[in-house]
Image (cartoon, rainbow, N blue to C red):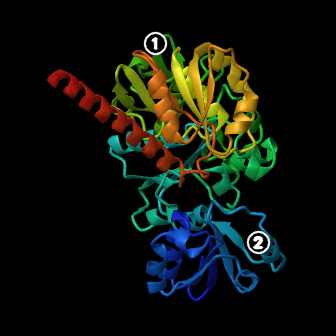
Amino acid sequence: MELKDKRVLVVGLGKSGVAAALFLQAQGARVTISDSKAEPQLGKEIPALLDKGIVVETGAHGERTFRDQDVIVLSPGVPVDTPQLQQARKYRTPIIGEVELASRFLKGPIVAITGSNGKTTTTSLCGEILAKSGMQTQVGGNIGTPVTDLIATSTVKTYNVLEVSSFQLETIESFRPKIAAILNITPDHLDRHGSFAAYAGAKERVFENQTQDDFAVLNADDTQCVEIAKRIKSTVFWFGGVEQAGNGAFVRGANIYWRTPEGEELEIMPVNEIALKGGHNLENVLAGVVVAVLAGCDAKDIRRAVKEFKAVEHRLEYVDTVDGVSYYNDSKATNVDATIKALESFSRNIHLILGGKDKNSDYTVLNPLLEERAKSVYTIGAAAEKIESHLHLPGSVPVVHAETLKNAVRLAAESAVAGDVVLLAPACASFDQFDGYEHRGRTFKELVHSLHAAAATSAERSGNG
């Protein structure tokens, strides 16, 4: 892709947009970056961009800005159907995403992992396994490091392990992972994609450019994945319920096994050596095993890496125990299915914090689990009233309108007793009250640590008295 002296517009001033703009400028392109947000909302990145000679447009997308370009590069947060982009398509301006741009320059095989839930944990785990197997490895994408930031450090031997979202997959053209995985597909981002079929179709695009020489990793227990397998050209490997069904990774008795296409089996590790909490994380480990074996890792290295791997921040992350009450941060549970998996990780006595920005979700499916396992529910954010209208729980499980996370933590701490669990698993996006799920999760942890400090101070005073 020749970029020198090309006019390139980057849309969206988030992390990936800034990374793309700086990369394009370094390649000799004449770069403009446009964001509809006002300048005060966009942080400290603008001066660095201006210093590089990049034109920055904020507050609105100018029609002429979109017209006079050779290429348009989209950040994943920008909807593909905005009026300015529709107009650009009439002028036949190429429109690609940051992942597509980066993939044209990235050296080494790509491992791409997507799914409604578990992407970040599985991507991080795969990166750890490959690195501990002695392979040159770097991890990025939707997980935090923009893919364009990985280009400079990539080599022909580097495994680029990427978390990719449906938003990123909407704008690919030639993106071709050597190993691509879909962990699961459940309703999410329906406010953006419009329908479940469109959302699932975006996920399926991860296999679009693969050939028979590439590998597809799919969940044998997910009906959408089973259907997708019928349509793809690459060689399929399964994880989950494949003991009787074919090749891949599965559990038999107390152990994880790998089965080759020829039917040979290899014991990988005992299930009880997995440090991650929850049945959904067993699925994530199985997916990681398939990716690792396909990449050439040995069973002993896989076992060691999985055994040593701890929970990723904001993914069912243990925070602290205060007065006998355990606090868990699952701020990344931004859809209903992720919240279900979090609830299934605890048998009972859960004080659940729900809410944020709604994604056109159905919260009624939470009722059976909440009735069985919850002691109370605290709603926060813009979706609170909708959630409350969907929850139909017995009087023994109160639903409390807490409005803010601070109030929810305080109220949960006041009602919880030793042996209970306070769980932040909001089933919503965070952008009504926070900058992102990371901001929400760290705020929760700060509130919990403040509770711990207050409890310690109270205990000290009682002792002195």
> Where is residue 155, by image quadrant?
bottom left
Tell which of 459 and 418 is nearer to you: 459
Comparing labels 2 and 1, the label whose residue is closer to the camera: 2
Does residue 43 sit above or below 26 in this rendering? above
Q: Quadrant of the N terminus?
A: bottom right
Q: Secondary structure at mark 2?
A: helix
Q: Mark 2 — residue?
A: 85
Does residue 76 sit above or below 349 in this rendering? below
Name the residue rendered at 48%, 40% in the picture.
406
- Tell which residue pokes out farthest to the right in this image: 90
Bin the neighbour count of mark 1 within 10 Å (Cα to Cα): few under 14, some 14-19, many 20 and up: few
Tell me which amino acid carries mark 2: Leu
> Where is residue 244, by image quadrant?
top right
Name the residue rendered at 40%, 24% in the picture.
326
Q: Mark 1 — residue?
A: 254
Tell me which amino acid carries mark 1: Ala
Q: CA distance from mark 2 to mark 1?
A: 53 Å
Tell which of 147 and 341 is nearer to you: 341
> Where is residue 287, by image quadrant?
top right
- N-term mark: 2 or 1: 2
- Tell which residue pokes out farthest to the top in this image: 253
Name the residue rendered at 75%, 78% in the picture.
93
